[in-house]
Amino acid sequence: MAAGQPGQLASPAGQPAPQKPDPTKKKNLSFFNHTPKALLNSSHIYETASKHAASYGVMVDGVTMNIPKMMAQKDGAVSGLTKGIEGLFKKNKVDYLKGWASFKSPTEVEVALADGGSTTVTAKNVIIATGSEVSPLPGLTIDEERVVSSTGALKLASIPKRMAVIGGGVIGLEMGSVWSRLGSEVTVIEFGAAICPFMDGDARKAFQRILQKQGLKFKTGTKVTGASLGAGAGPVTLALESAKGGDKKEELEADVVLVAAGRRPFTAGLNLEAAGITPDARGRIPTDGHFRTPAPGGTVFAIGDVIEGPMLAHKAEEDGIACVENLAGRNGHVNYGTVPSIIYTHPEVAWVGQTEEEVKAAGIPYKTGKFAFMANSRARTVDDADGMVKFVSHAETDKVLGAHIVGPAAGELIQEAVLAMEYGGTTEDIARTCHGHPTLSEAVKEAALATYDKAIHS
């Protein structure tokens, strides 16, 4: 069912449910995953020109940032991608309806068309692929001006002097990095004891040190209990206290507050009851191992952010391909153990498989190997040597259990580890593969070598 985005059905406990969507409002295909990447690139270019170009002997005076032009470049990229998908629909004879969809039965979907009117689509099979939305935070009303979601943070008309980011996860750190590079004083407030608790401990510590060096401030183990908006365009005052409780309380003023405390399945307005589907306690649609929901007749399937698993665009894409392969009588399958995760800050962070902490807790005998980009010739020559590569391998079989990279082009470099893990490769397999010199990928080879022997340049 590719019929726009539905509203939210039921919120997890303690979270307000959004209003039912207005079918008269036009919506383009969502390219949220690409939008912040455009701003991350623009802000990185600005920071390089204004702060680092001189160290390369490139003298640039009077560098300024034109926010409307930056936003226009971002919007142009999104528009081009949207038109590209619509072109693929046309080329492959896919009927495309813009509107808000809801079930009438497991095989009937009513679409309130964005241009007015409605139509009912009958299908042999229906795939729910409606994605996710920002999880609201009790006590904070998002107005997309002073208290913003990731959507509002992508559309700010000017650079806020002070920005508070609630949530030290992927989205909060990416968007916080954008505005920090452009001159905002950014403070990240994280309820947990550390940012990115899902990351390997060594990688997380290295990542936070780098972000702090770049100017981001962190308040971990901290809870936001309320917010008050100053008169007119005055600052937002956040009430903070220790996540563990106690008497320690403080206030933090910011011109813009970004709420980035996670995402939740975007399913309400779908009238799932008519399809015989009841979401779980976290709002996810239950499925079997082949994406089939409990809907009567086995005609309704679900993929991506609305089902269990990481909320990642590439995971959703693999889900979709596998689901359709199954419908066509083939054997579609997704190995969630080899789905990479990437944070597009600078440096980037990427990982796949298990962390050292997870392997240790599971009682699996393991070894680790690390290599710093500071010892990589390509990273040193381009003066971009923050970060490291780390492998976790099985102590007896040497099979790669996990790989973790903080550094330049980490999102590209991680794919070597993904391929090795998908086909049962070992760290020795990676280390004995010839890598071009000088390249960043040599850091991957050296970390792999360090896992079972000794890195050459360490």
Image (cartoon, rainbow, N blue to C red):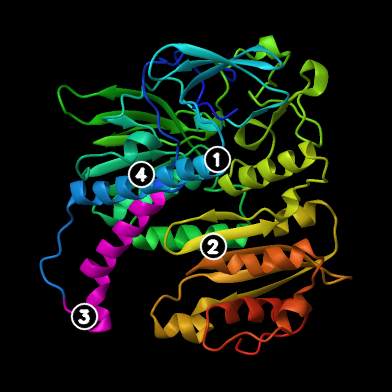
Q: Give the answer, above or below, for where 244 lies relative to 417.
A: above
The local crowd at label 4, few if under 14, some if 14 to 19, many if 20 or more residues have their Cα within 10 Å, is some
Residue 112: percent from left, percent from top:
48, 14
Q: Give the answer, above or below, for where 256 lies relative to 333.
A: above
SS class, disc 1: loop
Q: Which residue does the image show at 55% across and 40% down from the upper left?
A: 192
Tell me the residue that label 1 is attached to: 192
Residue 118: percent from left, percent from top:
48, 12
Q: Amino acid at mark 2?
A: Gly
Q: CA distance from mark 3 to mark 2?
A: 28 Å
Q: CA distance from mark 3 to mark 1?
A: 42 Å
Tell me the residue that label 4 is attached to: 79
The local crowd at label 2, few if under 14, some if 14 to 19, many if 20 or more residues have their Cα within 10 Å, is many
Q: Amino acid at mark 1?
A: Gly
Q: Amino acid at mark 3?
A: Val
The stretch of residues the image draws in magenta is 36-59
Query: Is residue 109 in view from this perspective?
Result: yes
Q: CA distance from mark 4 to mark 2?
A: 24 Å
Could you tell which of marks 2 and 1 lies nearer the N-terminus? 1
SS class, disc 3: loop
Q: Amino acid at mark 4?
A: Ser
Tell me the residue that label 3 is attached to: 58
Tell me the residue that label 2 is attached to: 411
Could you tell which of marks 4 and 2 lies nearer the N-terminus? 4
Q: Which residue does the image show at 29% across and 39% down from the upper left?
A: 155
Q: Is residue 198 left or right of residue 231?
A: right
Q: Are marks 3 and 4 in contact (CB under 8 Å)?
A: no
Q: CA distance from mark 2 to mark 1?
A: 25 Å
Number of dots carrying numbers = 4
